Amino acid sequence: MTRSNGRRDLSMEPTLSIIIAAYNAEKYIAQCLAPLTEFRAVDVEIIVVDDGSTDNTEQIVNSFKDPRLTLLNQSNRGPSAARNAAFRHSRGKFILPFDADDIAIAENWPSMIAALEANTDAVLAFGRRSLIHGDSSEVPSLPSTRAEGVNDAAAFPRIFKGNFLQNTGTAIIRREALEAAGLWNEGLRVGEDWDLWCRLACLGSFLSCPVHVMGYRIHAQSAMGAPIQKDFPDPALEAIETIYAHPMVKHATGASRSTLKRKAIAWQTYHWGTRLIRNGETFAGAKKLSQAITLRPSLLIHILGFPWRRLRSLLALSGITEAISRGRLMGYVWGACLLPASGL
């Protein structure tokens, strides 16, 4: 079923199509849609695909009376299938995939669109995110940066070693590039965004924009927040196999393919180890970190340098006086080596 909340002028192509996959999202979908329906800086359309929800997701979406908002319904087929359905219904020059439990900082999107308009060889522009924990409706601020948006020449081959874009919602994609890359892989439910970024990197450059564009929510049902145990297989390893089996990636990476794949597995093993530690599986997590170092010895330097990076991030956000007064400095210095920093 397709439903629009008012008249849509189908003769006009919006600048930006915001596509949202929603499954049992009643708890957060209103917080997600509110800033989107208030955004007027560029012409947008908002397409929500209810992916077979059994809660009140549909009713909440229907409560937003915005002619730019369209609701699609389908049986539960996963986030990739939902995004593909939304894309096929969209008309925008640029595409922004967004998750139903996250919160947009939409006022910073125009600078990303302007960067894409000025750099026609770029396939996407990406910004920065902060983390929202639990049910909060507040998006934490990020430390300011002096860096200007640049054509990120290092994105290729860096994206093949690890998903530095982090998650859906940080990137605005050029429509033609998304079509050429082949949309989202519906066989993947984890790492489907990374798989797409790698195929897009085969087609053109990425633009790094030093703007805060979203808050990514971590909760018990999110990809990063879901509890895991030592016997759980890492589903992202399947994504790595899928990435490196794709003909576009094979051609683009050439003789470096085996080395890049090894580094990707090492990075993912490291991240899985830190997640195990956060979930109380200290021994299993430490074992994974050891495996990661074996695959890529330079990770040892990265791990040893983590307390300083975490401390620096804390001081940038809280200020040294506040940090000392709360007695958190030494706690971060001693404990940070076991906890991954966001955005690093």
Image (tube, rainbow, N blue to C red):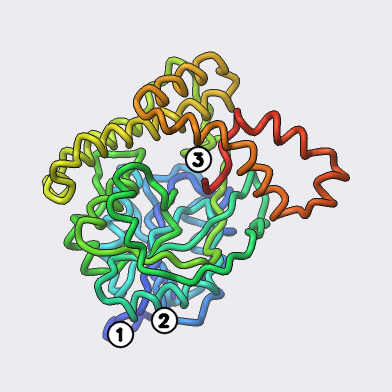
On the image, the x and y values in percent for residue 127 come to 47, 63
Q: Residue at x 70, y 48 (%)?
A: 314
Distance, label 3 to label 1, CA atoms, is 35 Å
Distance, label 2 to label 3, CA atoms, is 30 Å
Q: Residue at x 32, y 36 (%)?
A: 264
Left or right of 266? Residue 238 is left
Which of the labelled discs sits on residue 222, or is there none? 3
Residue 11 falls in image quadrant: bottom left
Q: Specify which label sits upstream in the sequence, 2 or 1.
A: 1
Name which residue type carries label 1.
Answer: Met
Name which residue type carries label 2.
Answer: Asp
Left or right of 313? Residue 232 is left
Above-or-below relation of 135 to 83 = above
Give the secondary structure at mark 2: loop
In the image, which is nearer the foreground, mark 2 or mark 1? Answer: 2
- How many residues crowd around disc 1 within 10 Å: few (fewer than 14), some, or many (20 or more)? few
Q: Assess whether mark 1 and mark 3 are in contact (beta carbons under 8 angstroms).
A: no
Residue 268 falls in image quadrant: top left
Residue 241 falls in image quadrant: top left
Q: Specify which label sits upstream in the sequence, 2 or 3.
A: 2
Q: Residue at x 26, y 39 (%)?
A: 260
Q: Nearer the viewer, residue 63 or 242?
A: 242
Left or right of 301? Residue 294 is left
Give the secondary structure at mark 3: loop
Q: Assess whether mark 1 and mark 2 are in contact (beta carbons under 8 angstroms).
A: yes
In the image, which is nearer the foreground, mark 3 or mark 1? Answer: 3
Which of the labelled discs sits on residue 117, or is there none? none
| Image quarter (top left, top right, bottom left or bottom right) of the N terminus | bottom left
Task: Give the labeled residue for mark 2.
Answer: 43
Task: Give the labeled residue for mark 1.
Answer: 12
On the image, the x and y values in percent for residue 61 come to 49, 60
